[in-house]
Image (cartoon, rainbow, N blue to C red):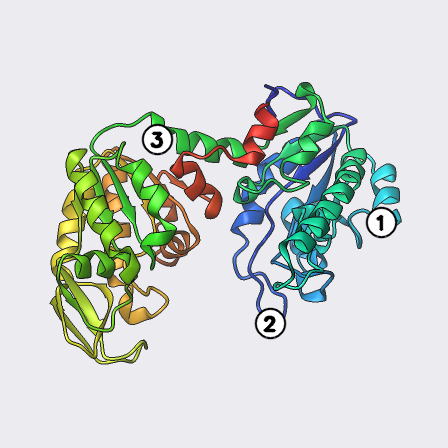
Amino acid sequence: MQTIDNFNFAGKKAFVRVDFNVPLDENFNITDDTRIRMALPTLKKILSDGGSPIIGSHLGRPDGVADKFSLKHILPHVSALLGVDVQFASDCIGEEAKMKAAALQPGEVLLLENLRFYEEEEGKSRGVAKDAPKEVKKAANEKVKESQKAFTATLASYADVYVNDAFGSAHRAHASTALIADCFDAGHKMFGYLMNSELEAIDKVLNDIRRPFTAILGGSKVSTKIDVIKNLLAKVDNLIITGGMTYTFTKALGGKIGKSICEDDKMELALELLKEAKANNVNLVLALDAKIADRFSNDARTDFVDVNNIPDDWEGLDIGPKTEALYAEVIKKSKTILWNGPTGVFEFENFTHGSRNVAEAIAEATANGAFSLVGGGDSVACINKFGLADKVSYVSTGGGALLEAIEGKILPGVAAVRG
């Protein structure tokens, strides 16, 4: 397989799929430019070789063209970070894009408009009512799939080489993340530096394990993490279940959880997972106590109680001190660590303590030689909020892509390049 280090981009135009899906405030100011900065090494390698990057990305989930999702809003910041006056095409497959791509000179950069302004990017029709008959939906999607080929071919026609550096979108079989790779031979398609780093970090966690291996899984619903949990139960020594999922397990075991979030229809599943953990000799760690609130608010009255004895009108919004000590003890003894999901409602300042405790324990374990991977939007937000991103081994830019990789799924964006 071709690698970015071994490829000389001199005189070449490279279609670089990045993930510049960054958060913007009401004035279109970027509030977190991590994803842009992470793509810089790849873009700068192409430029330093004397090549020309043509950048493709999506922003948000537009239903057609919408100014608030235009990539023109991030253009000045991308230019500033690259140190190049980046050109912009206001339509990713229009005549303007074709002309600017054709005229692009070595050392110049072109940013295309949001790829998802076209339904062909995702390959699904947006013009059919949700309650339309299945046959109508199928026909509409097939029509888009057919036009998707032309859309993909147009994007590919701009460049001599394809570089996928969008790990955050690698789990999507979209035109620019997977299908476009078929337009290039094996010697002219490759991963960027970010994609390589992400895949190496995941491989280290799942296949190059130093034990004990501890995974910390948070999140509100067991249902969204079933496959992740099952795959990890065959690999980890310790599995810490935290966040909102805690209360489904606690209630399944007969505990009183008050108004805490709970998936009643997943309690049987929770018990099955506990049995599976035991059968695999996995230490499945659940909370001992909780920080509870009388309402879902940062200003709510709070108290600490045993997690299985929460009063009827109260709800658990974070872990308590006993649980913090338990989690920290397990984490600090670990040599491989995966963290996905906070321990509580970390958006509320009064309920950040548990997540901070986990982050600090991971940082300490890392300082003592453990390999730690932090991934998923909320976990990344936590580690950044606490100023500890540089104290862990790797912070992933992928949310859904990371979870699917941990589930053991083959990511379309990866398979398309690897062949």
Q: As rendered, which of 13 and 79 lies closer to the eye?
A: 13
Amino acid marked by disc 3: Leu
User: Residue 33 at what x, y percent from top left?
Assistant: 55, 54
Which quadrant would the C terminus be assigned to in this image?
top right
Mark 2 nearby-residue class (10 Å; few <14, some 14–19, many ≥20): few
Q: Secondary structure at mark 2?
A: loop
Mark linked to residue 300: none
Mark 1 nearby-residue class (10 Å; few <14, some 14–19, many ≥20): few
Amino acid marked by disc 1: Gly
Q: Disc 2 designates what residue?
A: 26
Q: Are marks 1 and 2 in contact (CB under 8 Å)?
A: no
Q: Earlier in the sequence, mark 2 or mark 3?
A: 2
At horizontal 67% and vertical 66% (from top left) the residue drawn is: 68
Q: Disc 1 designates what residue?
A: 94
Q: Is residue 230 left or right of residue 312?
A: right
Task: Say above or below: 297 vs 361.
Answer: below
Q: Disc 3 designates what residue?
A: 206
Q: Secondary structure at mark 1?
A: loop
Q: Is residue 88 left or right of residue 83?
A: right
Q: Secondary structure at mark 3?
A: helix
Q: As rendered, which of 404 and 296 lies closer to the eye?
A: 404
User: Residue 85 at what x, y percent from top left?
Assistant: 75, 48
Which quadrant would the N terminus be assigned to in this image?
top right
At horizontal 38% and vertical 48% (from top left) the residue drawn is: 389
